[in-house]
Image (cartoon, coloured by chain):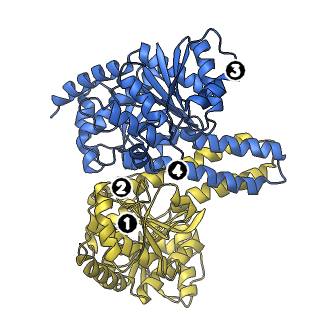
Chain colours: A blue, B yellow
């Protein structure tokens, strides 16, 4: 099995990325296609012992940088490392791509080069939302901002596969995010989704409200990418705001070490995507694994391990099968 | 000026409510119509010196209790105190109604008895959202779950009047809540609202994202009641969750007093509506002031002061005028 690694993606690229790729080759027994400017890739490789592992360098002269508009940057940089790496998957020269680069760029490359699964027009993003509710996924957090009921059904299936395969939750509970737990207390899209979810064969428990998110009331909480993105960014900022407030309040009362640790823990728990997030990009017709930008060698190796698991488990095929089943059952709904 | 007070609304009714009504009569120089079971109202009045103030008891044999379904309860209890009190306003026997009772009941009574301002179908709820951003209002937090662009325009006008009249912000900035600050990064309803807001004559600064809420980037942040309600309830629960986590973390490191104060402050800042919220119910064709359920006599008196201000300032007339102006200007938008 060969994993294409975006050698220039991430805050600590290329150093930690190359180191992580070597680590993964040993730990997970995979071949690596290391994609980036050849001289820089070779210079990093030379710093480490990489005997006995199979790492091929694939030259990509350009790369994305954080803060660029992803779609615009990709049009300008047709030989960016994330493009070349994703093309290896498209052309069956690698089984999966792994990147710690800007999420928008990884998503755009996957969308344009690998395409999406039938019936889904955009990748679905989501995962553990809050450190305080480690078994709760919120989906979609991404680009699906205008949703029809069939989108919610698809997100519910993706979330179920995610929770079962990645979080090892046997029969994940699924809920629609709404303004009241009672049926009928929602907007039109949510209300029309309820019968679909009920018939889907998924473990649908009804609607949950905003206060149920931190309580982890369901394993998979389904919402459109508009609500999800607002919640995600709000949570990140609120966590940091409370962290700053707390720093001021406990100054001099706790040791600097203790205070720092406390605030860091709070910021981690409210900034999961940024500090520990990642995972396979769902709804894409191929395996693209995103790692958060701050990833070190160890985290990158873990992500490569995830990619290997996704290939072995055939997560794309599995998702297609589950989507077909849920959509078929939901079609029979009133 | 006469203010109708729901004598049975609130966690501390009727004791603190009656006490607060007497206090308000003195502090704000208003007449009071105290609405509730006559014997209970008189028994409470007898506990206090109320010479020289004009308090009339209006009998209402029934009242709502927290946890009932408001619309259902109001159909059952046609002589509930909130109904009788709101009818006094409808029938021009009082200038405003003030209640610390269940929000759903106060809203339903206002909606059915006073009706809404032309072009608005439901009351608009909102106010200071977070203690960390005291000059930022989020609107709507209420029942307007499916919104068209003209709703967003109306919420922006309501928010502007609120921020200017209640928070004393001279030229409040207004923003649409979205998934990106750039124009076009939103769902259809938001994108279609941008030209209306631009032409409205309001101080529209564009779109803000989830992370801009705690930063107080705009004075008025406009969203539909679906997103607003989810954000509100999520914030309340997340604040409590972080409070519980913090309690465990600082146990033994701060004194019990200090720890309790710290956590209370956090919960207050994230539960503004519940702990300090209230204000006039907007879009209603009459003045109905909501006070949070835990209100004591002093807070109830403040709310009665707010009601007096709303009557004197003619907030309903003012809002109608501003709505007409903004709608007229926005009509000329492309």
From the viewer's perspective, is the residue at label 4 or at label 3 nearer? Answer: 3
Look at the numbered discs 1 and 4 and tell me whether their residues touch, using CB distance below 8 Å. no
For residue A143, above or below residue B319: above
Nearer-the-camera pick, B18 or A155: A155
Q: Is residue A15 left or right of residue A320?
A: right
Residue placed at 58% from the left, 86% from the top?
B27
From the viewer's perspective, is the residue at label 2 or at label 4 nearer? Answer: 4
**What whole-number distance in Å separates the C-alpha atoms at marks 3 and 2?**
46 Å
Is disc 2 on the same chain as disc 1? yes
**What whole-number distance in Å separates the C-alpha atoms at marks 1 and 2?**
33 Å
Residue A94's image quarter? Answer: top left
Q: Is residue A202 left or right of residue B232?
A: left
Q: Position of residue B40 (x, y in %)?
A: 47, 68
The quadrant of the image that shows the C terminus of chain A is top left
Is disc 1 on the same chain as disc 3? no
Q: Which mark is residue B186?
A: 2
For residue B137, above or below residue A60: below
For residue B90, above or below residue A66: below
Is disc 2 on the same chain as disc 3? no
Which residue carries the number 4 mark? A67
Q: Earlier in the sequence, mark 1 or mark 2?
A: 1
Q: Which mark is residue B106?
A: 1
Q: Position of residue B95 (x, y in %)?
A: 38, 84
Q: Which mark is residue A48?
A: 3
Residue A147's image quarter? Answer: top left
SS type, badge 4? loop
């Amino acid at each position: 099995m060969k994993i294409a690694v975006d050698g220039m993606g991430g805050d600590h690229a290329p150093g930690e990325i190359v180191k992580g790729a070597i680590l993964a080759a040993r730990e997970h027994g995979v071949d690596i296609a290391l994609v980036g400017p050849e001289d820089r890739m070779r210079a990093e490789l030379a710093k480490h012992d990489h005997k006995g592992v199979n790492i091929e360098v694939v030259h990509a002269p350009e790369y994305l940088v954080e803060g660029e508009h992803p779609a615009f940057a990709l049009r300008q940089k047709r030989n960016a490392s994330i493009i070349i790496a994703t093309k290896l998957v498209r052309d069956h020269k690698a089984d999966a791509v792994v990147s710690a680069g800007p999420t928008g760029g990884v998503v755009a490359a996957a969308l344009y080069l690998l395409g999406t699964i039938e019936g889904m027009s955009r990748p679905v993003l989501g995962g553990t939302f809050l450190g305080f509710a480690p078994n709760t996924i919120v989906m979609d957090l991404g680009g699906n901002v205008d949703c029809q009921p069939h989108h919610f059904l698809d997100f519910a299936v993706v979330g179920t596969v995610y929770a079962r395969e990645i979080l090892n939750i046997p029969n994940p509970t699924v809920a629609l995010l709404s303004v009241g737990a009672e049926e009928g207390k929602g907007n039109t899209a949510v209300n029309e989704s309820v019968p679909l979810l009920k018939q889907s064969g998924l473990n649908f428990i009804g609607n949950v409200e905003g206060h149920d998110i931190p309580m982890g009331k369901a394993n998979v909480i389904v919402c459109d990418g508009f609500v999800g993105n607002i919640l995600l960014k709000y949570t990140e900022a609120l966590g940091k705001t409370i962290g700053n407030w707390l720093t001021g309040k406990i100054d001099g009362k706790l040791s600097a070490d203790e205070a720092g640790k406390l605030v860091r823990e709070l910021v981690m728990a409210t900034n999961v995507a940024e500090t520990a997030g990642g995972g396979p990009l769902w709804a894409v017709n191929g395996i693209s694994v995103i790692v958060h930008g701050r990833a070190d060698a160890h985290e990158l190796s873990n992500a490569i391990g995830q990619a290997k698991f996704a290939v072995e488990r055939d997560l794309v095929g599995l998702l297609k099968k589950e989507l077909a089943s849920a959509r078929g059952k939901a079609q029979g709904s009133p």
